[in-house]
């Protein structure tokens, strides 16, 4: 079926899409708190930007918005012969420091505001990690559980075809995200390669299978980065009342890629996993949970609930469990003004994107509970994606040991830089700020310095 079914929208800086992402929360939310991801992202930017004296007003307005937003609509012939129309987005926030970088997700609640927020967070995440990428994000509105693998392949190939040359190895580089995996990345690569034959197109997408240019260590990278950042913050004295990971009690909300590998890696580092959860519920065990046993149970039964030796609780109960380290590794807006008072952890390490709202951030800061922010904690994934991109360009294949060592160096350097920025803001302005504000300020400063050197074209 032809292009007459396709609708494109290009939104330049300063535009506004009157669309709202619905909240994935597991309990009722207060009507007074704005949970729109894009509004939260802009609020976080505004809070930090005031501490970046190098940032001119005009540049501030530009970095606050979205560089480009594409919307495409396309038909797919399903397995039963019917034709369905799918909609997808690709947002590009910034290319100041390098190509746009960000995942593609498949979910019924993908929206323009969601991908714009996530694209901006990618810009700041890459800047905090000090890798030469900007920020992007995309998604298709669909429920993958209702589609066959063949239908998902068709959706992927048609979506990438409609994005056309808006993506590329040196312009905008997709990656896995919610409900997309290495096989989907292989389809993305193959589609792009068919349209751009005769070139080394492997760097157009990261998170690929190992057999076609993927990187060792990529699957565990987000969780491993979370471990490195949390351990470094503890070693640097940034977590009052906690001196070591060894023996620390850890609760993890979400048991997908980031959550399950975090459980395994933190346990290997000597921590005790006392609670885990997935979309169906949560379990706790004061004596500790074996992550491998939990993973095997979930694989067999479809849920962590019912794990032998554990007690069933709710996802909201997990957020309030008595623990040292709380790792939200699920959806956005999980710790909010209506449930933050019950948080008992000594530190929160955000493996998910946007799990803590601004109101909850403020309450936790006032209570002296540090939040290691998402743009620092979960930047391990995009860092190893950068390593994959470099390997593809250079036609190399690094050992897993080399990847993990480089990742450790990057994560520890980023953590140190954020802690140092927090001190600098206090020394320069006489005010104490939380670690999220410090991380955003560091990222904005790094992007600003490049933007000012590059100047405005033409």
Image (cartoon, rainbow, N blue to C red):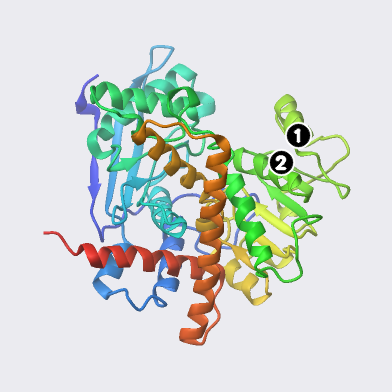
* Mark 2 or mark 1, earlier in chain: 2
Check disc 1 and report the residue beneath it.
292
Please determine whether, in this image, residue 90 is positioned above or below residue 195: below
Task: Give me the residue at 52% from left, 47% from top.
Answer: 406
Marking on residue 387: none
Q: Are marks 2 and 1 in contact (CB under 8 Å)?
A: yes
Please determine whether, in this image, residue 230 is positioned above or below residue 426: above
Please determine whether, in this image, residue 158 is positioned above or below residue 414: above
Q: For numbered disc 2, what is the local secondary structure?
A: helix
Where is the C terminus found, in terms of image quarters?
A: bottom left
Q: Is residue 265 left or right of residue 179?
A: right
Q: Residues within 10 Å of mark 1 (few under 14, many from 20)?
A: few
Instruction: Give the CA separation, mark 2 to mark 1.
Output: 7 Å
Answer whether residue 330 is visible to the viewer in this image. no
Task: Give me the residue at 44% from left, 41% from top.
Answer: 387
Image coordinates for residue 340, horizontal then vertical, percent: 67, 65
Task: Give me the residue at 31% from left, 47% from top.
Answer: 99
Residue closest to the eye, 191 or 46: 191
Image coordinates for residue 127, horizontal then vertical, percent: 41, 58
Where is the N terminus found, in terms of image quarters?
A: top left
Task: Give me the residue at 61% from left, 51% from top.
Answer: 226
Image coordinates for residue 208, horizontal then vertical, percent: 45, 29
Q: Residue furthest bottom?
A: 430
Check disc 2 and report the residue beneath it.
264
**Total of numbered circles in the picture?**
2
Q: Residues within 10 Å of mark 2 (few under 14, many from 20)?
A: many
Q: Is residue 363 left or right of residue 245?
A: left
Q: For numbered disc 1, what is the local secondary structure?
A: helix
């Amino acid at each position: 079926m032809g292009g007459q079914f396709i609708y494109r929208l290009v939104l330049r800086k300063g535009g506004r899409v009157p669309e709202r992402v619905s909240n994935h929360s597991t309990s009722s939310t207060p009507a007074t708190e704005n949970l729109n991801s894009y509004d939260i992202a802009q609020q976080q930017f505004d809070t930090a930007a005031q501490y970046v004296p190098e940032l001119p007003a005009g540049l501030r307005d530009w970095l606050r918005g979205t560089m480009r937003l594409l919307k495409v609509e396309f038909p797919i012939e399903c397995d039963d012969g019917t034709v369905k129309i799918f909609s997808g987005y690709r947002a590009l926030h910034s290319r100041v420091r390098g190509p746009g970088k960000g995942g593609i997700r498949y979910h019924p609640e993908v929206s323009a505001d969601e991908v714009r927020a996530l694209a901006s967070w990618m810009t700041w995440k890459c800047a905090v990690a000090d890798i030469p990428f900007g920020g992007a994000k995309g998604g298709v509105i669909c429920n993958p559980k209702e589609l066959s693998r063949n239908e998902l392949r068709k959706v992927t190939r048609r979506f990438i075809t409609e994005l056309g040359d808006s993506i590329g190895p040196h312009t905008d580089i997709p990656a896995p995200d919610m409900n997309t995996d290495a096989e989907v990345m292989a389809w993305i690569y193959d589609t792009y390669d068919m349209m751009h034959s005769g070139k080394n197109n492997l760097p157009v997408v990261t998170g690929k299978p190992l057999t076609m240019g993927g990187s060792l260590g990529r699957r565990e990278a987000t969780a491993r980065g979370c471990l490195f950042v949390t351990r470094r913050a503890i070693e640097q004295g940034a977590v009052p009342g906690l001196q070591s990971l060894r023996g620390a009690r850890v609760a993890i909300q979400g048991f997908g890629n980031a959550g399950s590998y975090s459980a395994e890696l933190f346990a290997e580092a000597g921590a005790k996993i006392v609670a885990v959860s997935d979309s169906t519920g949560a379990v706790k065990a004061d004596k500790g949970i074996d992550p491998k046993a939990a993973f095997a149970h979930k694989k067999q039964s479809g849920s962590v609930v019912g794990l032998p030796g554990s007690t069933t609780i709710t996802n909201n109960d997990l957020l309030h469990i008595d623990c040292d380290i709380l790792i939200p590794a699920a959806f956005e807006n999980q710790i909010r003004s209506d449930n933050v008072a019950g948080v008992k952890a000594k530190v929160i390490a955000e493996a998910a994107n946007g799990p803590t709202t601004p109101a909850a951030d403020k309450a936790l800061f006032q209570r002296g509970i540090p939040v290691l922010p998402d743009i620092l904690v979960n930047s391990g994934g995009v860092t190893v994606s950068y390593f994959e991109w470099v390997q593809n360009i250079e036609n190399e294949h690094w050992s897993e040991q080399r990847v993990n060592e480089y990742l450790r160096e990057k994560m520890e350097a980023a953590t140190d830089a954020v802690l140092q920025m927090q001190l600098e803001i206090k020394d320069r302005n006489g005010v104490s700020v939380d670690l999220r504000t410090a991380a955003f300020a560091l990222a904005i400063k790094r992007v600003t310095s490049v933007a000012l050197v590059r100047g405005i074209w033409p």
